[in-house]
Every structure is written in structure tokens, then in C-alpha cells.
Image (tube, rainbow, N blue to C red):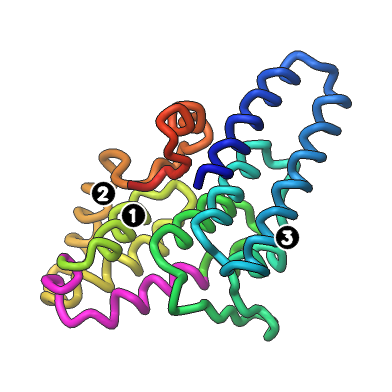
């Protein structure tokens, strides 16, 4: 994590340095930084393990450069090890595509419409994880399930329908009685504040680096 921390500090320094620079110079430098960051992320994915925490941290740093520098859906799938060879179908690596990978990829995609299909697929994958648990009790015993649920129900990039799918996957395990009002209450409770992942991670990047924790999670 140390190398990612150093890269993050360097990016903060450069962003502050070019803040008042002419726009053309600023964008050229940002594009240069973005290209290098993505190259690093792809190399990490190719030679280590796709979707590693180190690669996720690089993606968060790349996001901080602004919306002009967005990866394509195919590039995101490459970095996170998602099989997208069949058009419209995404196969997630079940052995390591967990909490941190899920919140990072959703954070990176934001609400951009070009990622609608992939965002839907990620939500579907989360629902599958929750469906495999026997009860609300067993979900509560898994920290990753609890963190995913609360963070995604709070996420500003997911639609109400997507949040409803996640909430329903949990609440139906107890009973379907009054399911609609219970779902609404659950989502409202989750929306009261940040839980484990800061969806405004860009604004918190400097403080996270100062604490040597380049993760909006935990």
C-alpha cells in the first residue's frame, strides 16, 4: 500500500500546482497522469491479481482527476477481472470480487449512463451474494454483507429500484409481510449518513492520505 500512498501524495501535489495554470496545460498534465495511473492499474491486474486493493486504490486516484478522464466499460472489466466477452453478460470473479472491489467500481462508474448495464450487473451480483445466505441472522454475522448493504443503500449512484432489490433480498428472509413499507424504512435508515465507504471520497482524499489510509473503506 505504501507505493499507492506515495503516488496519491504526488497527485495531490500536482493537482494543487496546476490549479491556477492555463486550462490547456492543466488538462495535458492531468491526461498524462491519468494514462500513467491506468497503465499501473492494468499492470497490477495482469501481473498480480485483477481487482486487487492496490488496483482499486489507483482507480480511486484516477477518478479524482475529473470526468474528462473516464475509462471505457471494457477497460474497467479488464482491471477488475470481469469477463465481458459475451455482449451484455458480465461474469464476476467470485473468489476475490468482494466488498472493496464492488464499492470501488460503483464509485468509479458514478451515475454515468454509459455504465448502466455494468452497474445493473454489479447490483445483481450483490443480490446473488445476499440470496445465498440462509437468514438475516447469517447476513448479520458476515461483515462484508453488512458493509455492502448499508453502503449501497446509501450510495448516490444507485437508483431507488436498485436499492429496493438489495433491501428486498435481505428483508424477505424474515417475511414478505409489509415488505414495501419495510424496504422504504430500511433505505431511509441507511440514507441517514455515511457508513463504511465515503461516496464523497474525492473530497476526503487529502485527509485519507495524511492518515496513510488510501481507502475510503473501513
Query: Which of the 4 image quarters holds residue 75?
Result: bottom right
Q: Residues within 10 Å of mark 1 (few under 14, many from 20)?
A: many
Q: Secondary structure at mark 1?
A: helix
Q: Nearer the viewer, residue 31 or 180?
A: 31
Q: Nearer the viewer, mark 3 or mark 2?
A: 3
- Which tag, 1 or 2, sits closer to the chain's start? 1
Q: Identify the residue under disc 1.
A: 153
- Which tag, 3 or 2, sits closer to the chain's start? 3
Q: Nearer the viewer, residue 214 or 181?
A: 214
- Which tag, 3 or 1, sits closer to the chain's start? 3
Q: Is residue 33 left or right of residue 102?
A: right
Magenta part of the chain: 121-140
Q: Nearer the viewer, residue 192 or 177?
A: 192
Q: Residues within 10 Å of mark 3 (few under 14, many from 20)?
A: few
Q: Residue at x 57, y 69 (%)?
A: 49
Q: Residue furthest top?
A: 20
Q: Is residue 192 left or right of residue 95?
A: left
Residue 68 percent across, percent down from the top left: 75, 41
Q: Identify the residue under disc 2.
A: 190
Residue 213 belongs to magenta span = no
Query: Which of the 4 image quarters holds residue 168?
Result: bottom left
Q: Residue at x 51, y 68 (%)?
A: 120
Residue 22 percent across, percent down from the top left: 85, 18
Cα distance between the residues tagged 3 and 1: 25 Å
Q: Identify the residue under disc 3.
A: 72
Residue 133 belongs to magenta span = yes
Residue 21 percent across, percent down from the top left: 80, 16
Q: Is residue 142 left or right of residue 105?
A: left
Q: Is residue 111 above or below residue 83?
A: above
Q: Residue at x 33, y 64 (%)?
A: 164
Look at the magenta stretch and give its main secondary structure. Answer: helix
Q: Is residue 161 left or right of residue 115?
A: left
Amino acid at each position: 500500500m505504501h507505493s499507492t500512498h506515495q503516488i496519491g501524495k504526488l497527485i495531490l501535489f500536482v493537482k494543487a500546482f496546476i490549479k491556477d495554470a492555463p486550462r490547456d496545460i492543466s488538462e495535458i498534465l492531468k491526461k498524462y497522469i491519468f494514462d500513467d495511473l491506468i497503465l499501473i492499474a492494468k499492470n497490477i491486474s495482469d501481473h498480480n491479481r485483477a481487482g486487487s486493493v492496490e488496483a482499486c486504490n489507483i482507480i480511486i486516484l484516477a477518478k479524482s482527476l475529473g470526468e474528462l478522464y473516464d475509462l471505457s466499460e471494457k477497460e474497467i472489466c479488464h482491471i477488475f477481472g470481469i469477463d465481458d466477452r459475451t455482449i451484455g453478460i458480465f461474469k464476476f470473479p467470485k473468489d476475490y470480487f468482494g466488498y472493496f472491489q464492488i464499492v470501488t467500481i460503483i464509485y468509479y462508474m458514478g451515475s454515468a449512463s454509459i455504465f448502466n448495464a455494468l452497474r445493473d450487473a454489479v447490483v445483481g451480483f450483490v443480490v446473488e451474494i445476499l440470496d445465498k445466505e440462509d437468514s438475516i441472522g447469517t447476513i448479520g454475522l458476515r461483515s462484508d454483507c453488512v458493509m455492502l448493504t448499508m453502503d449501497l443503500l446509501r450510495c448516490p449512484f444507485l437508483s431507488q429500484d436498485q436499492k429496493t432489490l438489495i433491501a428486498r433480498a435481505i428483508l424477505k428472509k424474515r417475511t414478505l409481510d409489509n415488505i414495501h413499507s419495510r424496504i422504504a424504512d430500511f433505505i431511509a435508515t441507511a440514507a441517514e449518513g455515511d457508513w463504511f465507504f465515503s461516496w464523497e471520497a474525492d473530497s476526503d482524499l487529502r485527509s485519507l492520505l495524511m492518515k496513510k489510509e488510501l481507502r475510503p473503506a473501513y
